[in-house]
Image: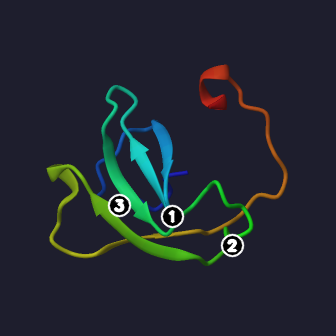
Amino acid sequence: SREMHGGVDIPSWGLMRTAPDATLICDPDSPHALCTLAGLDLEDRTRLVEGQSGRVSWHCDSNSGGGVDRWHVQCVEANSTEAEHELFDE
């Protein structure tokens, strides 16, 4: 989810792609990544733990504040949930 995103200009929804030891958040209308969450590997569920954090690298000017941005895993849901719409099931 995108809770606690004060001052960050990201779409209300989009796509995520995985890269080696990172997750990329992409705009739904573009193949380009908006940002990279370094160290967040959603493919390796054994390494995903609550409290985990890492660095965010922005690939667009709208979120470049000159400071260091960080991501944080607040909660890991153990149960899978069926998506409301097949578009969100990717």
Q: Residues within 10 Å of mark 2 (few under 14, many from 20)?
A: few
Q: Residues within 10 Å of mark 3 (few under 14, many from 20)?
A: few
Contact between marks 1 and 3 (CB within 8 A): the answer is no
Q: Earlier in the sequence, mark 1 or mark 3?
A: 3
Q: Earlier in the sequence, mark 3 or mark 2?
A: 3
Please state which of residues 83 and 25 is positioned toward the viewer in this rendering: 25
Whether residue 86 sits left or right of residue 60 in the image: it is right
Indicate the secondary structure of the residue bearing disc 3: loop
Give the mark toward the camera: 3 or 2: 2
Whether residue 65 sits left or right of residue 10 in the image: it is left
What separation in Å lies between label 1 and label 2 (alpha carbons)? 14 Å
What separation in Å lies between label 3 and label 2 (alpha carbons)? 23 Å
Q: Which residue is mark 2?
A: 49
Give the mark toward the camera: 1 or 3: 1
Q: Amino acid at mark 1?
A: Asp
Q: Which residue is mark 1?
A: 21
- What residue is shown at x 31% (from left), y 56% (from top)? 8
Measuring from the top left, give residue 36's x and y in whole percent.
37, 57
Residue, far right? 79
Whether residue 70 sits left or right of residue 77 in the image: it is left
Indicate the secondary structure of the residue bearing disc 1: loop
- What residue is shown at x 72% (from left), y 63% (from top)? 76
